[in-house]
Amino acid sequence: MIKRKIEEIVFKILMYSAFITVLISFFIILFTILIKGIPSLNLKMITQTPKGGYYLGKEGGILNAITGSLILACSSTFLSMMISFPIAVFLNVYNKKKSRYVQVIRFSFDVLTGVPSIVYGALGLIVMYFFNLRASLLGGTIAVTLLILPLMCRGIDEVLQMTPKSLLESSYALGSTSLETSFKILLRQCYPGIITTILISFGRGIGDAASVLFTAGFSDNMPGNFLRPAATLPLAIFFQLTSPIKEVQSRAYAAAIILTMIILFISIMSRVISLRFEKYKIK
Amino acid sequence: MEQKSHIEAKKLNVYYGNNHVLKNINLQIPDKKITAIIGPSGCGKTTLLKSFNRMIDIFDEVKVTGEVLFDNENIYKKNIELTHVRKKMGLLLQRPFPLPMSIFDNVAYGPKIHGLKSKKKIRELVEFYLKETSLWNEVKDKLQAPATSLSIGQQQRLCLARGLAVEPEVILGDEPTSALDPIATRKIEEKFHQLKKDYTIVIVTHILRQAKRLADYVIFMYLGELIEAGPADKIFNEPEKELTKEYIKGLIS
């Protein structure tokens, strides 16, 4: 009896410490960027583009990088959503669970999820060369889409796999086609989970520096054309952080605060939206 | 069998992988009657039921040989329009699974996918079938509430209403009351008694007393084989086969 009690206690302690480790790391990161960034945070940052010599500590802001990152992340999240939802539906509705084919595809996506983002950057570069594109917003979008595609596919796939089989049965029994079952039943049932997946992918996409390093280029102007280079927040942080000037380094942390705020805002928004649909979900 | 029959199985065999689940089934389901499929767990009752509307298709590694005739058409032949076959048979599952939408939309879903557009007609249909399943008075003030807010017995009746709304000819029930309490069970059973005027009803049950209460015709299955089929009186009172006798007495289960 005592042995079982001790087991229980030991595992409880392990769980609490794991939880606290994660929580503390999160707050350390948050406090670091807040303490180092707040002195440099001002309205000019989000309302102005860099004036000449901004990266040497002169006047201006990073509106171009904020806009660039938002456009890039939104368009690649949208693109990969358009590709990954059909894939996930194909795996779950149009194929049987134990099919060898499905298992191979799942395994490949798992491998692709682990590929470092710089490799996707390089891959994006090859694609761009093939189409004769220069470093541009479009190139960056392609690279980031490639980066988050496996993540999103597997995420949505996992969510769809959790649907009770009997729900599909009920839908088929009414004479629905597979397509109607996918879009009218499965999509509604899995809406909250899919939103979460999209969100995680968006966060990964907007925060990744390596994949856009070669592909999106950098520019001091506002992004206006998909075929021109565009600035992104991760690279803006990277360039400023590597500067020898203290003041510029501090601006990097301020930019990091903005990036974090964007992700936080979008998380909360999608939570609110998905909660509205949660009530219809069949448990 | 003197009556004409909607559903007929001829030399039906079903395999799950290497598992031979249904062995050479030949039977006819009488029209506008309640047929109960009885037998111990794992004897293939549910598989037999779900082979009638090809619901077994969605399971892994299923192989079917033989024929199931529905209105004299083999539903396992190639190029059959599956949605039509399934539309003609309402299905009730062990546990009710309402669709992830409001009560109203649950009933309206079927007619909508089969092409009904008029909002007025849809509203009439929803009301009609909710009344048909005695649910209307309980839900008329909260038609837009999620279906999951209903009790499990109400959900099962909602599933029945949803199934009836596509105007099937047959109702299939896979132990439709096994998750319900006695009162909800009685309501469903009463519905079946009313509905058999217009529909052919086939239910799977492992509760003998329920089969006795409901069935006009009984099919007894054992280990994937059809042992005996016939009118309920005969099966319950003077079964021909030894196995059936033992099962009715409760010796095997």
Image (spheres, rainbow, N blue to C red):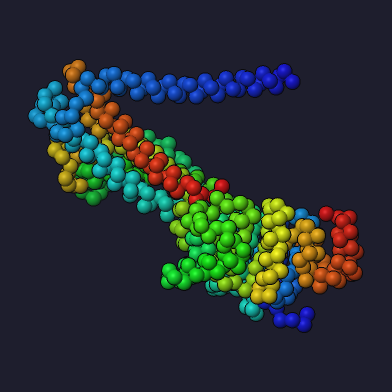
Q: Is residue A105 above or below residue A260?
A: below
Task: Pinpoint residue B155: horizontal percent, then vertical percent.
Answer: 60, 56
Q: Is residue B196 above or below residue B140?
A: below
Task: Pinpoint residue A256: horizontal percent, then vertical percent.
Answer: 28, 28
Q: Quick check: B201 left or right of A103?
A: right
Residue at 52%, 66% (x, y): give it: B126
Occupied quadrant, residue A124: top left
Residue at 74%, 60% (x, y): give it: B205
Q: Quick check: A62 left or right of B20?
A: left
Residue at 56%, 47% (x, y): give it: A283
Task: Pinpoint residue B140: horizontal percent, then vertical percent.
Answer: 53, 60
Residue B29 visible in the snapshot: no
The number of numbered discs placed on residues in the rendered structure image is: 0
Residue at 18%, 37% (x, y): give it: A64
Image quarter where the N terminus of chain A lies is top right
Occupied quadrant, residue B198: bottom right
Residue A35 visible in the snapshot: yes
Q: Is residue B252 above or below residue A110?
A: below
Q: Is residue B86 above or below residue A85?
A: below
Task: Pinpoint residue B182: horizontal percent, then vertical percent.
Answer: 73, 54
Residues A96 and A261: in front is: A261
Residues A80 and B6: in front is: B6
Q: Quick check: B162 left or right of B240?
A: left
